Amino acid sequence: MDVVKCSPCNLFDHAIIKSGRGGGGSSNNNRGCAALGVSRSPSPKIRMASLRAALPLWSEAAARKLEDMAKSSGLDQAFGEFGAGSFLPPAATAALLGLALLCITVAILHKHSSKRRRNNLPPEVPGLPFVGNLLQMTVERPHRKLTSWSNEYGPIYTIRTGQKSQVIVSSPELAREAVVAKYSSISNRDLGSNLTILTRNRKIVAMSDYGDRYRMLKRMVVNNLLGQTSQKALHVQRENYLRIALDGLFDELGRFPGSTGQVNARDCIANFLFRLGMHQVFGRDIESVRVPELGAEVTRWEIYRVLVQDVMKAAVQIDWRDFFPSLKWIPNRKFEDGIYKVERKRSAVTKALMEQHRQLSRSQQRDKCYCDVLLDNESHYSEDELLLAAWEPIIESSDTTLVTSEWALYELASGPKLQEKLYNEIKRVVGDERMVSEDDLPNLPFLNAVIKETLRKYSPVPILPPRYIHEQVELGGYTIPAGYQLIVNIFGIHHDPKRWSNPETWDPSRFLGVEGGSFDMGLTDMRLMPFGGGKRICAGMAQVFYVVPMIIATLVQHFEWTLPQGDMDKRNVVEDTVYLTTQKLEPLQACAKPRVPRRLPSKTLNAVPSNNKVPEHKH
């Protein structure tokens, strides 16, 4: 028997059969016959013989029941019952259903392929039905997977993650076209459920939709905290906390004089950055705060965990429904409860800190700070905006700045010759009698190159948060429909071998000379864009170029850094990222050997946090 088309009537429209005993009949009479393996012949004998010949294909019980019905009620009744699916065994049902789904999928893919050709879309990475490229993204770090695809499909291509389509760009020219030239069509973030909850529906500068509220929030934080003028005014605070950190490091090493000098460099840097960030926002060095909603006194390191670490962990939790918007109605309580718990604790601690700040008299020992600016303009903000405006500078200075500082120190500890080159530059400019200061930074080109090369190889955020394309746009010669997401692969741009020689090698010398000074860090030139680019460039960029160089310069000036032998052996297999940023997978454990017996004196005489003021706040 040669089956031309086989389908049960409840899944397909009709069946056509060719049988050695005969065939024919109307399409209605043939329904179900092909799956059974019999045809509707005018001769009852032939029809009964065909039925008996096909019965071994089915379960014994179903075959017996079907044959009994054929004898007692006639073949028409038997064929009608079969056509309704009454005798189809479970295994056959599953197989035929799978065949039906396969046919549907092939039809959808064919239609999708035809539509792509008509719409002039970029090349598409092949994926699986329904899930697209989602499973492929779990094989390795997403930014590395996207980079490997750009090597195969070019600097612009598309992928699908579930029901969402993304266009990926991995070249500076396309990045500039997307975030500068076509900004009006691609200006807003497309956030997942976790970030929507953590930002209370986009109420922070980094994640808010572009518009009047975004401009107001960004202007406030730049003019009064993160801009060049404010950051210059805060240099004494930074120097004070650096002195405190260095004194603490000397004390720790002094307690164990015969040891290898191994320290947790991440904790050392994180402690400095968090205390500095809290002081800039709340005007003092905070030891603890009473949190009524938690019913407890929360210490500094507990505050750090709640405001920074827990939030960064929650930011990478995945809600599978984000990839299938049509299934948002399905509950995912475990995921939501976990994110909301982190958000509630973050809000409770921030609220307690602001309330504590309100209660402090201006006569007490604290500096003019960003929280004062926020409270003076309280009437312009909602409660959510006020809390998040106080929290956002703390997490940005405590996490992304930490990532860059830790990787720079790791590379210098791994490369003694490059570390010695930096130390000699500092010694030549500063001498042996005092600590390096921010006034020295313009005269330390190799230090500047160290920071830029670290930002290239270890961009704090390797992939820009997705932007939503809200109207059809031309990009790279292709037509991108509204509804797609745009993803700029910063890691791919910074590791393109066509633009960077030996991109996996950390080599600060590439940023020396005239060429090294031509990078504007993403304002218009996207060859190096660790802070994003265009109008949505990171508001904290100026702070990074004050804080990170001073951390690295003072640590190298006072200590010789090396990796423990075990870490040196593993150097070439280091993984790069965890959480939302490219944070080192394991905290940096490094050996610090003092170059001088104690911390060098600084230009400023005060060793305690000063009462320096930020400029009058601007609205």
Image (spheres, rainbow, N blue to C red):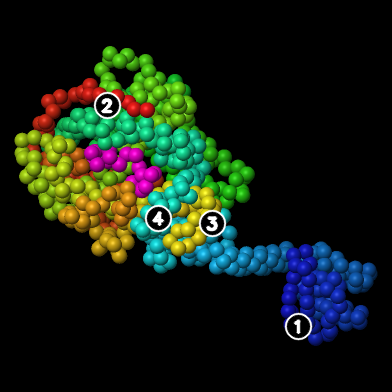
Q: Where residue 1 is drawn, which disc sits there?
A: 1
Q: Which residue position is annotated with label 2? A: 614
Q: Earlier in the sequence, mark 2 or mark 1?
A: 1
Q: Which residue position is annotated with label 4? A: 177
**SS category of the residue bearing label 2:** loop
Q: Earlier in the sequence, mark 1 or mark 4?
A: 1
Q: Earlier in the sequence, mark 4 or mark 3?
A: 4
Q: CA distance from mark 2 to mark 4?
A: 37 Å
In the displayed structure, 229 sits above or below 450; it is above
Q: Residue at x 27, y 38 (%)?
A: 543
Q: Residues within 10 Å of mark 1 (few under 14, many from 20)?
A: few
Q: Which residue position is annotated with label 3? A: 481
Give the amino acid at mark 4. Glu
Look at discs 2 and 1 and give the one toward the viewer: 2
Q: Residue at x 27, y 61 (%)?
A: 500
Q: Is residue 285 visible?
A: no
534 part of magenta stretch: yes
Give the amino acid at mark 2. Val
Q: Residue at x 26, y 56 (%)?
A: 570
Q: CA distance from mark 2 to mark 3?
A: 46 Å
Q: Residues within 10 Å of mark 3 (few under 14, many from 20)?
A: some
Residue 517 as seen in the image, left or right of residue 399: left
* Quadrant of the rendering where the N terminus is positioned: bottom right
Q: Is residue 44 visible?
A: yes
- Measured as percent of width and height from the top left, residue 430 is found at 8, 40
Q: Earlier in the sequence, mark 2 or mark 4?
A: 4
**SS category of the residue bearing label 3:** loop
Q: CA distance from mark 1 to mark 3?
A: 50 Å
Give the extent of the magenta segment: 531-548
Q: Earlier in the sequence, mark 1 or mark 3?
A: 1
